[in-house]
Image: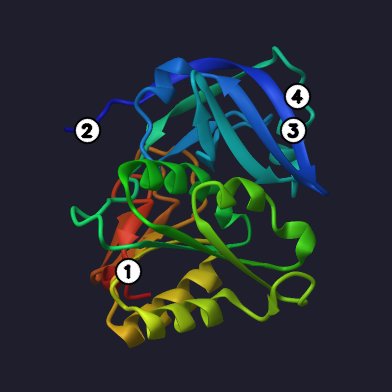
Amino acid sequence: MSIKPTLIKAPLVENIQLGKDYYTSWFFAPDIVERISPGQFVMMESGQYLLRPFSVYEINEDKIGFLYRVVGGGTSFLSRLQVGSKVSIHGPLGKGFSFAEDKNIPILLVAGGIGIATFPIVARVAKEKGYKVKTLFGARSLNDLVCAEVLKKDSELEVITDDGSSGRKGFVTELLTHELQRDKRQEVFVCGPTPMLKSVIKVCNEFGVIAQVSFEEYMACGYGVCMSCVIKVDGKYIRTCIEGPVMKSNLVTS
Protein backbone atom coordinates (compact mmCIF):
# COMPACT_ATOMS: atom_id res chain seq x y z
CA MET A 1 0.00 0.00 0.00
CA SER A 2 1.43 3.37 -1.02
CA ILE A 3 1.68 6.18 1.49
CA LYS A 4 0.25 9.53 0.46
CA PRO A 5 2.90 12.26 0.76
CA THR A 6 2.36 15.34 2.89
CA LEU A 7 3.14 18.97 2.07
CA ILE A 8 4.14 20.88 5.19
CA LYS A 9 5.83 24.06 6.29
CA ALA A 10 8.71 22.83 8.45
CA PRO A 11 10.78 25.05 10.76
CA LEU A 12 14.57 24.77 10.73
CA VAL A 13 15.87 23.36 14.01
CA GLU A 14 19.61 23.35 13.33
CA ASN A 15 22.19 23.95 10.60
CA ILE A 16 25.53 22.16 11.07
CA GLN A 17 28.59 22.73 8.91
CA LEU A 18 30.47 19.45 8.44
CA GLY A 19 33.41 20.80 6.47
CA LYS A 20 34.15 23.14 3.62
CA ASP A 21 30.89 23.55 1.65
CA TYR A 22 29.05 20.67 3.41
CA TYR A 23 26.07 21.07 5.73
CA THR A 24 23.30 19.14 7.42
CA SER A 25 20.00 20.94 7.91
CA TRP A 26 17.48 19.59 10.42
CA PHE A 27 13.78 20.40 10.32
CA PHE A 28 10.88 19.68 12.66
CA ALA A 29 8.68 17.43 10.52
CA PRO A 30 6.97 14.70 12.58
CA ASP A 31 4.30 14.01 9.94
CA ILE A 32 6.98 13.00 7.44
CA VAL A 33 9.40 11.39 9.90
CA GLU A 34 6.87 8.79 11.04
CA ARG A 35 6.38 7.51 7.47
CA ILE A 36 9.83 7.75 5.85
CA SER A 37 11.65 4.65 4.58
CA PRO A 38 15.41 4.44 3.89
CA GLY A 39 16.16 5.58 0.35
CA GLN A 40 13.11 7.79 -0.09
CA PHE A 41 13.37 11.52 -0.80
CA VAL A 42 11.45 14.76 -0.40
CA MET A 43 10.92 17.84 -2.53
CA MET A 44 11.99 20.92 -0.59
CA GLU A 45 11.84 24.67 -0.96
CA SER A 46 15.26 26.16 -1.61
CA GLY A 47 14.73 29.83 -2.38
CA GLN A 48 13.88 29.15 -6.01
CA TYR A 49 10.66 28.93 -8.01
CA LEU A 50 10.39 25.15 -7.83
CA LEU A 51 10.96 22.69 -5.02
CA ARG A 52 14.01 20.47 -5.49
CA PRO A 53 14.75 16.86 -4.47
CA PHE A 54 16.77 15.95 -1.38
CA SER A 55 17.64 12.49 -0.11
CA VAL A 56 16.82 11.88 3.53
CA TYR A 57 20.08 11.75 5.47
CA GLU A 58 18.66 10.67 8.83
CA ILE A 59 15.78 11.12 11.24
CA ASN A 60 16.03 11.84 14.96
CA GLU A 61 12.82 11.65 16.98
CA ASP A 62 10.56 14.21 15.24
CA LYS A 63 13.30 15.83 13.15
CA ILE A 64 14.42 15.08 9.60
CA GLY A 65 17.93 15.84 8.37
CA PHE A 66 19.44 16.50 4.94
CA LEU A 67 23.11 16.43 3.99
CA TYR A 68 24.19 18.52 1.01
CA ARG A 69 27.11 20.30 -0.60
CA VAL A 70 26.74 24.01 -1.37
CA VAL A 71 27.07 24.25 -5.15
CA GLY A 72 24.46 26.78 -6.21
CA GLY A 73 21.66 29.10 -5.22
CA GLY A 74 19.37 26.45 -3.72
CA THR A 75 21.89 24.81 -1.41
CA SER A 76 23.36 28.21 -0.53
CA PHE A 77 19.87 29.32 0.51
CA LEU A 78 19.51 26.32 2.83
CA SER A 79 22.95 26.77 4.38
CA ARG A 80 22.12 30.39 5.30
CA LEU A 81 18.69 29.72 6.80
CA GLN A 82 18.16 30.92 10.36
CA VAL A 83 16.75 28.65 13.06
CA GLY A 84 12.97 28.98 13.09
CA SER A 85 12.71 29.77 9.38
CA LYS A 86 10.07 27.63 7.66
CA VAL A 87 10.36 25.92 4.28
CA SER A 88 7.93 23.79 2.31
CA ILE A 89 8.71 20.06 2.36
CA HIS A 90 6.74 17.51 0.32
CA GLY A 91 7.21 13.86 1.16
CA PRO A 92 7.99 11.08 1.63
CA LEU A 93 8.33 10.38 -2.09
CA GLY A 94 9.56 7.52 -4.26
CA LYS A 95 10.56 3.94 -3.55
CA GLY A 96 13.41 3.21 -1.18
CA PHE A 97 15.70 0.23 -0.60
CA SER A 98 14.38 -3.28 0.05
CA PHE A 99 16.00 -5.52 2.65
CA ALA A 100 16.45 -9.23 1.98
CA GLU A 101 14.48 -11.66 4.14
CA ASP A 102 17.68 -13.59 4.90
CA LYS A 103 19.57 -11.52 7.46
CA ASN A 104 22.67 -13.64 6.91
CA ILE A 105 23.17 -11.83 3.60
CA PRO A 106 25.39 -8.81 4.37
CA ILE A 107 24.54 -5.38 2.99
CA LEU A 108 27.19 -3.50 1.02
CA LEU A 109 26.63 0.24 0.62
CA VAL A 110 28.50 1.82 -2.30
CA ALA A 111 28.58 5.62 -2.34
CA GLY A 112 30.17 8.18 -4.62
CA GLY A 113 30.51 11.81 -3.57
CA ILE A 114 27.38 13.39 -2.13
CA GLY A 115 25.56 10.13 -2.87
CA ILE A 116 26.62 9.27 0.68
CA ALA A 117 23.79 11.54 1.84
CA THR A 118 21.23 8.75 1.53
CA PHE A 119 23.15 6.09 3.48
CA PRO A 120 23.34 7.00 7.21
CA ILE A 121 19.64 6.20 7.68
CA VAL A 122 20.03 3.04 5.57
CA ALA A 123 23.02 1.83 7.60
CA ARG A 124 21.32 2.48 10.93
CA VAL A 125 18.05 0.78 10.00
CA ALA A 126 19.90 -2.19 8.48
CA LYS A 127 21.96 -2.63 11.64
CA GLU A 128 18.85 -2.37 13.83
CA LYS A 129 17.22 -5.08 11.71
CA GLY A 130 20.19 -7.38 12.34
CA TYR A 131 22.17 -7.16 9.09
CA LYS A 132 25.93 -6.89 8.84
CA VAL A 133 26.70 -3.65 6.99
CA LYS A 134 29.78 -2.39 5.17
CA THR A 135 30.14 0.96 3.38
CA LEU A 136 32.46 1.67 0.45
CA PHE A 137 32.84 5.45 0.13
CA GLY A 138 34.56 7.06 -2.85
CA ALA A 139 35.23 10.81 -2.82
CA ARG A 140 37.42 13.37 -4.54
CA SER A 141 39.52 14.17 -1.46
CA LEU A 142 39.68 14.04 2.33
CA ASN A 143 37.49 17.16 2.54
CA ASP A 144 34.68 15.32 0.75
CA LEU A 145 34.57 12.35 3.13
CA VAL A 146 31.74 13.85 5.13
CA CYS A 147 29.77 11.91 7.78
CA ALA A 148 32.39 9.15 7.90
CA GLU A 149 32.25 9.03 11.70
CA VAL A 150 28.46 8.73 11.60
CA LEU A 151 28.69 5.77 9.25
CA LYS A 152 31.26 4.03 11.44
CA LYS A 153 28.62 3.75 14.18
CA ASP A 154 26.50 1.40 12.12
CA SER A 155 28.79 -0.11 9.48
CA GLU A 156 32.32 -1.08 8.66
CA LEU A 157 33.76 1.72 6.51
CA GLU A 158 36.34 1.63 3.73
CA VAL A 159 37.22 4.82 1.84
CA ILE A 160 39.02 5.68 -1.36
CA THR A 161 39.81 9.11 -2.82
CA ASP A 162 40.66 10.40 -6.28
CA ASP A 163 43.79 12.17 -4.99
CA GLY A 164 44.84 9.65 -2.34
CA SER A 165 44.46 12.16 0.52
CA SER A 166 42.55 9.52 2.53
CA GLY A 167 42.43 5.76 2.12
CA ARG A 168 43.62 4.34 -1.17
CA LYS A 169 44.02 6.44 -4.30
CA GLY A 170 41.53 5.42 -6.94
CA PHE A 171 37.82 4.91 -7.53
CA VAL A 172 35.11 3.19 -5.53
CA THR A 173 34.64 0.60 -8.28
CA GLU A 174 38.05 -0.80 -7.32
CA LEU A 175 36.83 -1.42 -3.76
CA LEU A 176 33.61 -2.95 -5.10
CA THR A 177 35.49 -5.31 -7.41
CA HIS A 178 37.61 -6.52 -4.50
CA GLU A 179 34.52 -7.05 -2.32
CA LEU A 180 32.66 -9.05 -4.96
CA GLN A 181 35.74 -11.14 -5.68
CA ARG A 182 35.75 -12.00 -1.99
CA ASP A 183 32.00 -12.61 -1.68
CA LYS A 184 29.34 -12.18 -4.39
CA ARG A 185 26.56 -13.05 -1.97
CA GLN A 186 26.01 -9.51 -0.76
CA GLU A 187 23.07 -7.15 -1.12
CA VAL A 188 24.56 -4.13 -2.91
CA PHE A 189 22.97 -0.69 -2.46
CA VAL A 190 24.37 2.13 -4.60
CA CYS A 191 24.03 5.92 -4.79
CA GLY A 192 26.15 8.57 -6.49
CA PRO A 193 26.58 10.65 -9.65
CA THR A 194 25.47 9.12 -12.95
CA PRO A 195 28.97 8.27 -14.31
CA MET A 196 29.78 6.44 -11.08
CA LEU A 197 26.46 4.56 -11.18
CA LYS A 198 27.16 3.36 -14.71
CA SER A 199 30.61 2.12 -13.67
CA VAL A 200 29.21 0.33 -10.62
CA ILE A 201 26.45 -1.29 -12.64
CA LYS A 202 29.05 -2.54 -15.12
CA VAL A 203 31.06 -4.14 -12.29
CA CYS A 204 27.92 -5.73 -10.83
CA ASN A 205 26.98 -7.13 -14.25
CA GLU A 206 30.44 -8.69 -14.60
CA PHE A 207 29.89 -10.57 -11.34
CA GLY A 208 26.25 -11.42 -12.01
CA VAL A 209 25.15 -9.30 -9.04
CA ILE A 210 21.87 -7.38 -9.10
CA ALA A 211 22.29 -4.15 -7.13
CA GLN A 212 19.70 -1.71 -5.89
CA VAL A 213 20.63 1.63 -7.42
CA SER A 214 19.38 5.03 -6.26
CA PHE A 215 19.35 7.46 -9.19
CA GLU A 216 20.03 11.15 -8.68
CA GLU A 217 18.07 12.86 -11.44
CA TYR A 218 16.85 16.42 -11.86
CA MET A 219 13.21 16.79 -10.85
CA ALA A 220 10.74 19.65 -10.99
CA CYS A 221 7.74 18.05 -9.29
CA GLY A 222 8.57 14.73 -7.60
CA TYR A 223 5.27 13.04 -8.37
CA GLY A 224 5.40 12.08 -12.05
CA VAL A 225 4.03 15.09 -13.90
CA CYS A 226 7.02 17.06 -15.22
CA MET A 227 8.78 14.06 -16.87
CA SER A 228 12.19 15.65 -16.27
CA CYS A 229 13.60 12.65 -14.37
CA VAL A 230 13.02 9.83 -16.86
CA ILE A 231 15.64 7.15 -17.48
CA LYS A 232 15.60 4.09 -19.73
CA VAL A 233 14.71 0.94 -17.83
CA ASP A 234 13.92 -2.46 -19.31
CA GLY A 235 13.67 -0.92 -22.79
CA LYS A 236 11.31 1.91 -21.91
CA TYR A 237 11.49 5.31 -20.26
CA ILE A 238 10.18 5.59 -16.72
CA ARG A 239 10.04 8.27 -14.04
CA THR A 240 12.61 7.93 -11.27
CA CYS A 241 10.39 9.92 -8.89
CA ILE A 242 7.61 7.30 -9.08
CA GLU A 243 9.17 3.97 -10.07
CA GLY A 244 12.40 4.95 -8.27
CA PRO A 245 14.61 6.50 -7.18
CA VAL A 246 15.79 2.98 -6.19
CA MET A 247 15.74 0.43 -9.03
CA LYS A 248 17.28 -2.94 -9.84
CA SER A 249 20.56 -2.62 -11.75
CA ASN A 250 19.73 -5.43 -14.19
CA LEU A 251 16.81 -3.41 -15.60
CA VAL A 252 18.85 -0.35 -16.49
CA THR A 253 19.89 -0.48 -20.14
CA SER A 254 21.34 2.99 -20.57
Q: Label 2 belongs to which residue?
A: 2
Give neighbour class at mark 2: few <14, some 14-19, many 20+ (Cα, 10 Å): few
Numbered label attached to residue 130: none
Q: Amino acid at mark 2?
A: Ser
Q: Label 3 belongs to which residue?
A: 16
Q: Nearer the viewer, residue 11 or 50?
A: 11
Query: What secondary structure is marked by label 1?
Result: loop
Q: CA distance from mark 4 to mark 1?
A: 41 Å
Q: Nearer the viewer, mark 4 or mark 1?
A: 1
Mark positioned earlier in the residue sequence (2 or 3) = 2
Q: Label 4 belongs to which residue?
A: 81
The residue shown at (18%, 53%) is: 101
Q: CA distance from mark 3 to mark 1?
A: 34 Å
Q: Which colour style is shown?
A: rainbow
Q: Label 1 belongs to which residue?
A: 186
Q: Amino acid at mark 1?
A: Gln
Q: Is residue 193 left or right of residue 251?
A: right
Q: Nearer the viewer, residue 230 or 2?
A: 2
Q: CA distance from mark 2 to mark 1?
A: 28 Å
Give neighbour class at mark 4: few <14, some 14-19, many 20+ (Cα, 10 Å): some
Q: Is residue 233 left or right of residue 147?
A: left
Q: Amino acid at mark 3?
A: Ile
Residue 210, image x, y percentages: 28, 71
Residue 47, image x, y percentages: 69, 29
Residue 92, image x, y percentages: 39, 31
Query: What secondary structure is marked by label 3?
Result: strand
Mark positioned earlier in the residue sequence (3 or 1) = 3
Q: Amino acid at mark 4?
A: Leu
Q: Nearer the viewer, mark 2 or mark 3?
A: 3
